[in-house]
Image (spheres, helix red, strand yellow):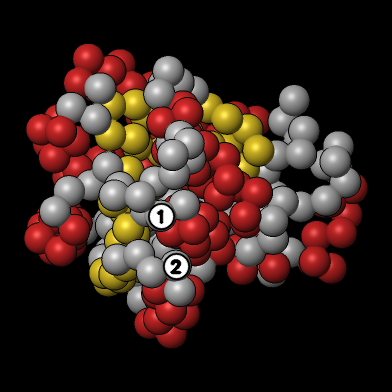
Amino acid sequence: MGGMDMTGKAAVVTGGSRGIGRAVCVELASRGADVAFFYAGNESAAAETLEALREYGVHAASYKCDISRGEDVTAAFKSVLSDFGAVDILVNNAGVTKDKLAMMMSEDDFVRVVDVNLTGAFRCSKAVIPTMIRKRSGKIINITSVAGMTGNAGQANYSSSKAGLIGLTKSLARELCSRGITCNAVAPGFVETDMTSSLPAGGEELAKSVPLGRFAKPQEIAKAVAFLASSDADYITGEVLRVDGGLAM
């Protein structure tokens, strides 16, 4: 029973139907964790993820939830707690982009991205904290981005939301450490997902800007998340772990 064995733990992953979220779900399930994941609307992607999780013989379930709506989040966590009994791990991964130069960006596009990426993570954390406090243990992991550390042209909304997640991570870490709960963040650089596949020429030029010369695979982000969610990371809190091939160093 190493620290990376998660048998008997229950995890919630937001934005779990594809990309980094799906990789995180699969990684946690492969270590024995039961997995509940939220998805915004892609039913077929959610069904595929669910199928992948059930191959590990763990309890798995999907929940359609718009994390920009407080009542949706409350209802989803109520369902999760009745289906899984507790939540030991929360991975706030759900995110959207609406890229434009700030001068051209509508206020609605700014507010929407912050509402999903940052306020959504706050809503989910708030929903799960009471059950973690009762158990006097828990792990919250927020998926931020190197864009939140360095900024990114055309992403004033996204970079702001991801920088805000770093502040949220550190504040929650301070508030919850006396209750045996840790809160950390993982900051990916470029990752091979649907979100980056729309980049021109598959992002080959961008890949050259990464010291390691390539984009990350979603599984590489997921392994960092699994480490922070495991008992091996019990003494780590308030940390932002870059998994970016050296992009932001």
Residue found at x 62% / y 55%? 219
Extreme residue toward the front, this view: 1
Observer-nearest residue: 238 or 161? 238
Residue found at x 27% / y 42%? 88
Q: Which mark is residue 56?
A: 2
Q: Amino acid type of disc 2?
A: Tyr
Residue found at x 69% / y 56%? 217
Does residue 69 lie above or below 210 as drawn?
Answer: below
User: Which of pointers 1 and 2 lies earlier in the amino acid sequence?
Assistant: 1
Q: Which mark is residue 146?
A: none
Extreme residue toward the bottom, this view: 44
Residue 112 makes an appearance in the image: no
Q: Is residue 193 left or right of residue 15?
A: right
Task: Give SS at disc 1.
Answer: loop
Q: Is residue 8 left or right of residue 167?
A: left
Position of the C terminus, as image quadrant, is top right
Observer-nearest residue: 110 or 229? 229
Q: Name the residue beneath numbered marker 1.
A: 32
Q: Amino acid type of disc 1?
A: Gly
Residue 86 makes an appearance in the image: yes
Q: Is residue 34 left or right of residue 51?
A: left
Q: Residue 14: x, y in percent?
A: 36, 56
Residue found at x 56% / y 63%? 19
Q: Residue 43: x, y in percent?
A: 38, 82
Q: Residue 16: x, y in percent?
A: 42, 63
Where residue 147 sits, quadrant-wise, is: top right
Q: Are marks 1 and 2 in contact (CB under 8 Å)?
A: yes
